[in-house]
Amino acid sequence: MGPKSNPMSLVKNQNFVLLLIFVALNVYFATTTQSYFQLGNYFNMLTQNAALLLTAAAATLLMKTGNFDLSTTANLAFSGVLYALLASWGLPLTLAAVITLCAGICFGAINGLLVTRYDISPFIATLGMMCIGGGAALLICGGQSVRTGLPDNFSSLMQTDIFGLPTPIVISFVGITVFWVAANYSLIGKYAMAIGSNKNAAALAGINVDRVVMGLFVLVAIMASLAGIMTASRIGSGDPRVAEFFFMDVIVAIMLGGTPLTGGRGTVIGTVIAAMIVIVIGNGLNMLGILVFWQTVIKGVILIMAVTINEKFTFSRLSEKMSAPGFSQ
Amino acid sequence: MRFLHADPQKVVLIGILAALIVGLTFASPHFLSVTNFTNVLLKVAVIVIIASAANLLMVTGNFDLSVGSVLAFSGILHAYMSKHGVAIELSILITLIVAMGWGGLNALTVSVIGINPVIATVGTLFIARGFALLIARWDGGANIMLGLPRDFVDFGRDPVFGLIPLAIVVMVAAVGTFIFIEKKTALGRKAYAIGANLKSAKLSGINTVGIVSLLYVLVALFAGLSGVLQTSRVGLAAPTVGKGLEFDVIVAIILGGTSMLGGVGSTFGMLLGALVVGFTANGMVLLGIPFYFQTIAYGGILIGTLLLSRKFDAKAAA
Amino acid sequence: MNGQDENIIEIRGIEKSFPGVKALKGVSFGVKRGTVHCIVGENGAGKSTFIKILTGAQPATRGEIKLGGKPFSPHHVSDAIHQGISCLYQELNIVDELTVEENISLGQEKHKFLFPQKADNLEKAGAILADFDSTVSLGDRVGSLSVAQKQIVEITRALVAECSVLVMDEPTAALSLGETTKIMQVIERLREAGMTIIFISHKLSEIFEIGDTVTVLRDGEMVGTQSLEGMSQPDLVRMMLGKVVAEEYIPSTGARDQAVLEARGVSTRKLKDVNFDLMKGEILGFYGLLGAGKTEVAEVLFGHEYRGEIKRDGRVLRFRTERDALRAGFALVPEERREEGIFGLLSVMRNIPLMNLKTVMRRGLVSGKAERDLADKYIDLLQIATSGRNHPVALLSGGNQQKVVIAKCLNRDADIILMDEPTRGVDIGAKQEIHNIIRDLANKGKSVIVFSSELQEITGLCDRMVLMYDGMVRETLRNGDELSTDYILEVVAGKEA
Amino acid sequence: GKIPYTLEHSYHQSIVEMFADHADKYYGAKTIVVDGQANSDTTLSAVENLIAQGVDGIALHSPDIGMTAAAVAKAHAAGIPITTTLIYPETKNAPHIAPQEALSSHREGVVAAEKWIAANPDKPIEIAILDFGGFEQVVHLRTGPFVAGVKSIAPDAKVVAQQNGFGNTVKSMEIMLDILQANPGVNIIFGGNDDMALGALAAAEQLGRGKMDNGVPLTEIIAGVDGGENAMIKIFDPNSSFKLTQGQVRDNARAEVDTLVAMARGELAIDAWMEIPTLSQEIDYWNTTLAGAQRFLQENFKFEGNLAELLAN
Ligand SMILES: Nc1ncnc2c1ncn2[C@@H]1O[C@H](COP(=O)(O)OP(=O)(O)OP(=O)(O)O)[C@@H](O)[C@H]1O
Ligand SMILES: Nc1ncnc2c1ncn2[C@@H]1O[C@H](COP(=O)(O)OP(=O)(O)OP(=O)(O)O)[C@@H](O)[C@H]1O
Ligand SMILES: [Mg+2]
Ligand SMILES: [Mg+2]
């Protein structure tokens, strides 16, 4: 693929603003608290949110097609419980993980089927799946977290290091890179963009729109399921009530990162930086010892301001571009 | 047949509603009674009141996720003022004005500045919720109940004409108003136009910014009103109420056939959607179905309704 | 293979029903290999529907197609593409967010594990593109191009595809003469190379220039398939409409002595010092090649930013938004009907009053009866082919959508009416009707500005014409006997006046 | 560091305050509060954040047993003392502050049943329960013992409905309306916390129930848990049917602080398992004096008003 000069530079610039906001927040927290600007704290933040980063990166691709998935929360909880349950029955962890991922795929497959084949709005389809999956998670464990009979190495996935980096950080880093490459250099990214921007055109160009959308729903489901496994091993049990607002975090990160609900635009990098912004705000405000209610208010204000700065900046970029090359001659 | 062709989704909703009512009448001896229907209506009242405005907002292709927080904030604010000596009427008036302020904030960010409604209204959701919790804290607790004057509660509980609870009256009025707006006024026509094609609407001289802003303010106003009604009825203002209300509202709207992208939808459909959800929840509690199964069944109803109406769609087309 | 005699495509009894509409009622004909097969018919006759069935974009209700003698029933567009059928659809089907190059390869990339390989036809695409419009390059983002440029990108995409059958649904509607000529040359070359081309256009001159055979559809039915050799234009029109139409310039009857609009030194990034007057009761035409700046003039008059001065009845105008322009008595038929003109999800009845809701309000409320009456009036006036006034506009044929846009604008009852490509995609019968309506308006004292890339429309309709080249006004001519088409073409092509 | 379950409930707001006060007054220690937001992974993150900030001790109120073990292990790995409350990990390797809720829940059940039977011997007991949707510690400490208490008096008492009240007054009101509709015979209602009990009361009142005749049960008896002022005012209103609750704030907070300090000073091994019982005082209309309730509120919720006065108007 040749150099994609125009759109990339535009998008890069938008991410650049996000990056500036991110850096500014870091500088602020680093100067106002002692314990913020430390490697350990960054490791903490990344480990705590590895699952979120991973899922959001994958879900960016889905959102680019103009679809989204609310059932990630339920999938995460369900997969965590199932994984712990299988492990507690004495299955080897790898096998338990594989079976769990297969079950997690069902969420994506059903979501995808409902949206593509039966033309049901992604909101209702995935919200329905969220309810069903959430109920199922509670059901298979009888409402109590699964924690007895787990093997000793149950938590090691999240607690070991690879080359001095915590494993979950490595996993999410690898995942993000894969999705970044998929979004920018493979046909999946291009097709997702085309579908979100102009579904008709994509279909008439011979792209099998349904298959792409279906595939992306499945991809997101796998990541949510993996996120469930990661969370279960992090907290050392399968808790059916874990991460209630996971889907909200995912969607906020993606949108703050510049992908609209209708799709057609967006970058994985934008999503990741946006997610980091949200994460850093939460962590930094905690470090500052601010009352959680004020944190809520501040989070809202920063969210609105960040997206405003971001979009305004993009606008001026656009008009600048219009005036620039090849236009006057 | 002609009717089917007109709007299969509504037909399916009416069908499901009828099936629910008939089924529950047989399944539970306590279902078919005035009290129970009043209960169901009271339960959906908050959703329907907000959704009648939010429906038209969604018809323009926008939506508001902050309604739950604005409701909680308004309830707390009203209780706080009433408790500290502001007359009930005045307190309600001030609360509603402040509620419209939240709508104004949404209007400013989404419609005037033009940022993504999801992020903008989630921002408002956080801010309003934070302040609701803070007001309660300033009052010295996690919620406000002690020291509320007598007429605070009376306002919400005294039936209108000694017959119908106020919330239900407001609900009927809200639905009526918006059916009227949708069918008979320029505002309604323009809202549909904006949702169908924003660019065309601008070129046709429609004040897109103004109309979307107005609707945001109305939605917030209705959310504030619901907050006042709800706290008065319960007799306690908690800043945690209304979590996830935005979803209930959107579910009712989308189930009723309104598209998230705008341009299509109806208030009547929304009402049907809300009633289906309301009767389902009611029926499951009446039958004593455990909580886990309730969520599963709820998800099933959502998906099932749309699957059915797609099926009818296909039949009508053939 | 002895090309000329063999039917590469054989169509038998194709029928297509939509809810409430039967778009095709049994169409049968054969397409000979290596010929240019034209399809003509009024708006809504079913041409585009037929094309969509042929290329797998929509399933047929009944009937069969044979491709190269074998039964062919595509379920998906890619089926047709694999069988060597490449298609250019009527409405723009292009992805704004991608670059020109990405659009051209969209859906057809060669890839390894989903990673695209360097396309080998890039040079070819670049050459075709450069031939049409040197300002468009492969790396441009399509969203920043003009409509006509987008159309060229689509044409390029269709042309670079390796195919044996090329289908083109109104490829020239958005183009001006220069590009149209180039397309004709390309088609000629392709035919010589043995390719089969199915070509749809409302511009009959093109049909006669390039076509070998023509199939005429009327209201979903076959009228007939004939060789174009020896056929005359009136014959074809008669076949299409059952009557003959001729269009000649008829001066409007107004006094045309009072200037309602004066533009002095109007400049934008694109326009350079544009001056013109518009008289009361006049039809003023703007003509120029692709990208000459016609649309930009319309946009300036409808609220876009500019430098310079525009006076309306002697007073200087300054408006910031479209609404200001509307209030000042302007109305616009925009160029991109689907994106800027229609409200696709809404019915015909709901669309028409939207520029002027007062026309359906009685005592402050919308009156259902007034709405229905208004819709019926325009459906009748403009002969909009729709199964009813409640039909969503998105489901109308392209030409009929355009008529809805015009109806919406007419209903505004503005004094100055701006029409950017008012009859793009409209069949000749209806075009004549629209022209008559425009003349009527002028005769009633309204002033109309028509921006068009179609020379015949300008010369047949306008009292005066402004010729544009590269953002500048080159010359303003009065219509009349001494008008020379060649001269006009020279001016708009950049020859110094 | 103190991690409350969620600051959105008054109980937890109070305990945080008591905790900070006590730590400051007796030990000159500073308290950092990070909200666990009623969620396993947020709570675990809160533990990690406190560890990162290098606190000297962590008092954890965890929402889930499974996660607690991981949290304790993390703190221990960093050499930081940690206590648990209400829920303790199965590893049993950190001091646990154990409010004796089960005892008081049982007692609530006993009192409610006795009072009901005394007033309405002909109406068999039917119980309705609002819980948090199956949290197990709620079953062990609250709903389970309560039902056992009722049954110890009236063996044929039946639980006819048990639903999720989400710990929230409004939701509880809506659900209780439906429950009472389906089971008009319900006469003892237990709310897993006071907010839910208040919701149940509001529902009963809307149906024209919720009444007592000067402490004599007419329609039903409602019991809750926590003992905040909102509940207290109803409990001591002779004509309201909300009559019982229980609670502890101060003792629990103090026990947490004391234990942490003891560990930080090396007086106590940080991985020693021990249960430190604290009393969860049962309060009801019939057996608790108004003065006692007033004192309870002052001690536990920093109540500044006068209960008797509030009741008078
Ligand atoms: N998806 C659809 N649903 C319902 N009706 C449709 C649909 N698509 C086309 N039609 C109807 O089918 C008829 C034929 O439309 P078609 O687009 O094929 O016409 P056309 O000959 O291409 O006209 P034009 O010259 O205006 O492009 C029209 O009456 C149109 O309203
Ligand atoms: N080279 C270009 N690059 C980017 N945008 C262009 C270019 N040319 C035109 N446009 C955009 O397209 C719109 C229409 O352009 P313009 O007025 O120049 O065309 P026109 O004379 O109407 O010819 P046509 O519609 O046939 O292209 C303008 O508003 C402008 O924004
Ligand atoms: Mg067509
Ligand atoms: Mg133009």
Image (cartoon, rainbow, N blue to C red):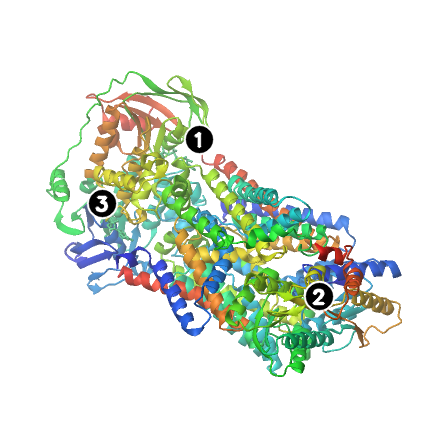
Q: Amino acid at mark 3?
A: Ala
The chain holding disc 1 is: C
Labels 1 and 2 touching (C-beta < 8 A): no
Q: CA distance from mark 3 to mark 1?
A: 34 Å
Q: Establish if A295 lies above or below C324.
A: below
Callout 3: SS: loop
Marked residue nearer the N-terminal end (3 or 1): 1
Check disc 1 and report the residue beneath it.
Answer: C304
Residue D226's disc is 2
* Residue B111 image point, x, y percent: 51, 41
| Disc number lying in front (2 or 3) | 2
Q: Amino acid at mark 1?
A: His
Labels 2 and 3 touching (C-beta < 8 A): no
* Residue C191 image point, x, y percent: 23, 49
- B216 sits left or right of D63 in the view: left
The answer to whether the residue bearing label 2 lies less than 8 angstroms from the nearest atom of ligand 1 is no
Nearer to the camera, B133 or C112? B133
Q: Establish if C388 lies above or below C85.
A: above
Q: Amino acid at mark 2?
A: Asp
* Residue D20 image point, x, y percent: 81, 59
Nearer to the camera, C173 or B291? B291
Q: Residues within 10 Å of mark 3 (few under 14, many from 20)?
A: many
Check disc 3 and report the residue beneath it.
Answer: C385
The answer to whether the residue bearing label 1 lies less than 8 angstroms from the nearest atom of ligand 2 is no
| Disc number lying in front (3 or 1) | 3
Nearer to the camera, A6 or B167? B167
Callout 2: SS: loop
Toward which corner of the image does residue D225 lie, by quadrant? bottom right
The answer to whether the residue bearing label 3 lies less than 8 angstroms from the nearest atom of ligand 1 is yes
Q: CA distance from mark 1 to mark 2?
A: 65 Å
Q: Establish if B102 lies above or below A116.
A: above
Q: Residues within 10 Å of mark 1 (few under 14, many from 20)?
A: some
